[in-house]
Amino acid sequence: MAQQSFDSIAALKAFVGQPAVSGEAIVVDQAMIDTFAGVTHDQQWIHVDPQRAALESPFKTTIAHGLLTLSLITGWYHRCFAFPNRKLALNYGFDKVRFTSPVPCGSRLVGSFQLARVDDVKPDEVRCCWTVKVQAEGAERPAMVAEWLMQLRY
């Protein structure tokens, strides 16, 4: 997949409303879930205990942390998009994040990004609002939907 490239604010603004760009699938396995649990100190059994999850979880397996799913979007973003001539990029945060379905261990997730708007902040600087969806292959609903704000200076 070729990166979508934005060499200017004008190029960003021209991309508003275009179809979403999707990244390549990432497998969320137990090793990834366990590593995330270790970093965040979130050792809830539904994430890290496959035997108990098989017996007690409605999903019959462990599931990824919602915040693990959210954290994957930066990697897709950097592989999907290039910003030649950009002087600065700041993660400005989220207006909305929802975890709309579980991510069972072994899921192949795909992140997609659609540029919803570009707001001028000051000369040569804008705030972009990306509609982000993360979906497990074969799932009916996305695992996560978000409105992600990135501030860019050219």
Image (cartoon, rainbow, N blue to C red):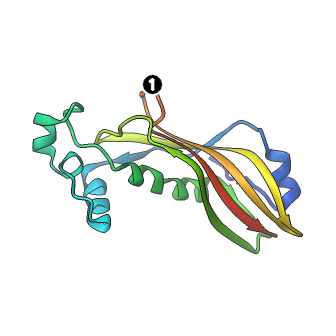
Tell me the quarter of the image containing the C terminus: bottom right
Is 137 drawn above or below residue 88 in the view shown?
above
**In the image, farthest residue toward the front:** 95
Measured as percent of width and height from the top left, residue 119 is found at: 81, 55
Q: Is residue 103 left or right of residue 132?
A: left
Q: Is residue 79 left or right of residue 100?
A: right
Q: Residue at x 67, y 55 (%)?
A: 81
Q: Is residue 35 left or right of residue 154?
A: left
Is 85 drawn above or below residue 28 in the view shown?
below
Identify which residue, 25 or 13, lies in the foreground: 13
Q: Which residue is mark 1?
A: 140
Is 137 drawn above or below residue 8 in the view shown?
above
Amino acid type, mark 1: Glu
Measured as percent of width and height from the top left, residue 16 is found at: 79, 44
Identify which residue, 19 or 2, lies in the foreground: 19
Q: Quadrant of residue 50?
A: top left
Q: Quadrant of residue 121?
A: bottom right
Q: Residue at x 31, y 56 (%)?
A: 32
Mark 1 Cα-neighbour bin, 10 Å: few <14, some 14–19, many ≥20 = few
